[in-house]
Image (tube, rainbow, N blue to C red):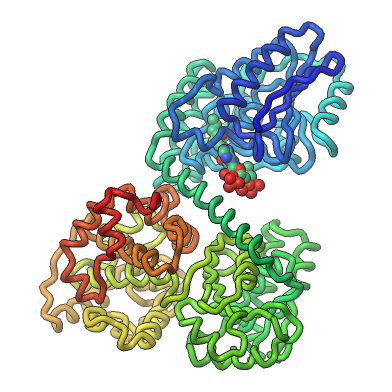
Amino acid sequence: MTTVTLHRSDALGVITLDNPPVNALSREVRAGLLARLQEALADDGIKTLVISCAGRTFVAGADIREFDLPLQEPHLPEVLGAVEASPKPVIAALHGTVLGGGLELALACHHRIAVTGTTFALPEVSLGLIPGAGGTQRLPRLVGAPLALDMIVGGARLDAGAALAAGLIDGLGQGEPLALAQTFMHEHPRLERRPTGERHLAPFDLEAFEAQARVLLRKLPGQEAPVQALEALRGAWQLPLSEAMQRERDLFVARRESAQARALRHVFFAERALAGRNRALAKAAPPVELQQVAVIGAGLMGSGIALCLANAGIRTILIDTQAQALERGRATIDSYFSGALAKGRLTAEQASARAALIRCAIDLAAVAEVDLVIEAVFEDLAVKQEVFRQLDRLARPGAILATNTSYLDIDAIAAVTGRPEAVIGMHFFSPAQVMRLLEVVRIRTVAPAVLATAVQLGERLGKTTVAVGNCHGFVGNRLLAVREREATLLVEEGAAPEQVDRVLRDFGFAMGPFELRDLAGIDIAWRNRQGRGEALSAAERACDLIEQLHAAGRLGQKSGAGYYRYEPGQRQGQADPAVAELLAAHRQRRSIIPRSHSDKEILERCLFVMINEAAWLLEEGIVKQAADIDLVWLHGYGFPRYRGGLLYYADDRGLAHIVSTLEGWSDALTERGTEICPRLRQLAAEGRRFLDA
Ligand code: 3HC
């Protein structure tokens, strides 16, 4: 229940906001705050005011759920204007995460004190917005324009110590926020009003500021909000305060309705809904407690997984039966921790404590000590089955056996063990210690507690953990495979790899399909195609560019050439005339007359076949929630967050348009061994959307 109360204690009036879980500034809270403020101002006995919050945090922002509704009075800038104009001094007593509108409320108060551990940020740009209640004007007046730039445009977060040093807060201590406010008042018996808006902006180097702004914006390509946040911030020295406030508000109101902000809100709530479903899994079947975990295979993937586990404080045994591989794994781990130390991300104590959590072992028998094993050996079914036979023999009864396979049939792996209920997929993405996504692959036989354990572990590792069903490539790689197939067919028809990559980069991906293929390795794709054999459609088999590149020794970045040519030490590829020749010869052999493709056709072909495949994933029950498909591609494959995800994009484009476009290619789809998914047709026919279904 939401309440805003005023409590009087001698000459102090304490306004307490209570709107669980994060005290968002809903209409009710804004109205309550304004009403209690007016009461406090009318009470002659009250000389000083404190604003604080009940529960786990001070206000964490405006209420995001209201952003899809019309604006409702009282508006936040007016409420905060009234706070700042208070003739009695107002102190903000802060704890938890003081974010967005919450920080703007604190800025409108005359003094700010915080509990140790409090963090501060204006994360509006991550929601496609800009601060809308004075943040772009009051923050620079307190902390200076350069730091305000990092926070408002770059979304930088400050811890309490940094906030004190920057002048954002006036006091910091342990204990209850209200008690800290009282101590602050005793220490400052003649506390006065000190409206932030009346302060002068400290002089700063405008040229250095603009250079820093360019650096920040380059890191956020395609996003509109940071550009507009910068424009609002510039008002702090370009305009009188009231005009700058109005400009900020106008920009905020327009952004609230923008396509990017709507897409980013979808992602915000999809992420929270996933976390909620994952918590429900653990409630339904309590997870196994994990004291120690083993990782099998000390390659880049295995070492990366071991790092994730150690970073989450879990004792880990990294096992590889090849001494050299184990040594390389240890070296990878050591260099990660020395790098984290050098960059100041970890203290020496933290780095050595975490490194000490990883023990290396050469004998598979070490798995007898652990509760969960994650296998990360060579991607080959027979090899993995052999490892699982041994694990089944050596691991203690009840221990969970997970495989990190990215394509293979996990039912077939589980079938060689005597514990198919304890076998599960945990598909990490490379480099595992960096990438946010984890696909947990449930097979038919898996026990609910085993699924809950793997999902809970993923959450503990800080991963976006999505439970999916078992099929070739699961969710992420199955969609990747259809995009790669389509991209390759486009090139076979006449498009240049550079054009296809540019179109997808322009859409917002960090790299295009061919750049990605060169990074991941032509040999990996080659092995995959060999493994699929008869499962390849005639069109896919005939389009054998991967085999040709492989035969030419062009394995991608690792060999200095793939679809592109790489100068030594360079990760940015150059278009290669040798590839153009290879393509021309291939087309001639196949009697294909090359044609040109518009950027629109390239984009639609690459994305629409993925949307169709996503519909099949839903149809087959591989994934239950359409939003989970969005999250897999956002966190594992760099789908641009400001476009909301693959199926959000599909809904936005309109499913009827997508179906009619796919119908135009229906012969080609049949040649590729696929067809338009009935679910997609039905949603389109009924005028429905993936995300509402
Ligand atoms: N509005 C509405 N609901 C919110 C919310 C907000 N600002 N912030 C969090 N919630 C909800 C979540 O949806 C979730 O709901 P659920 O339990 O029903 O799923 C619940 O609060 C708890 O959130 P989390 O699961 O994320 O809890 P955590 O403890 O992990 O994180 C948090 C808490 C750090 C506050 C995180 O929720 C967060 O970052 N929230 C968004 C903060 C933000 O972006 N604020 C700026 C809003 S825009 C703004 O203020 C505009 C202004 O300038 C006018």
Please report the residue visible at 67 percent of the width from the left and 85 percent of the height from the top: 319
Which residue occupies the foreground of this view, 591 or 264? 264
Q: Is residue 658 left or right of residue 222?
A: left
Residue 172 shown left or right of residue 75 in the figure: right
Q: Quadrant of residue 681?
A: bottom left
Against 353, residue 332 (above or below) is below
Q: Is residue 236 above or below residue 67?
A: above
Closest to the observer: 689 or 445?
Answer: 445
**Which residue is at 45% across, 58% downward?**
625
Q: Quadrant of the N terminus?
A: top right
Outermost residue on the front side: it is 284
Is residue 10 at all visible to an observer of this figure? yes
Residue 579 position (above or below residue 240)? below
In the displayed structure image, the side of residue 442 where residue 187 appears, left or right: right
Query: Which quadrant of the view contains residue 325?
Result: bottom right
Q: Is residue 156 visible?
A: no
Image location of residue 670, percent across then percent down: 20, 73
Q: Foreground residue, 68 or 590?
A: 68
Residue depicted at x 29% and y 59%:
680
- Tell me residue 276's x, y (percent): 59, 53
Q: Position of residue 195 (x, y in %)?
A: 67, 17
Q: Position of residue 321 (x, y in %)?
A: 65, 91
Above or below 591: residue 39 = above
Of the four image quadrants, the one with ligand 1 is: top right
Q: How many numbered marks, from 0 up?
A: 0
Quadrant in the picture for residue 672: bottom left
Q: Nearer the viewer, residue 477 or 193?
A: 477
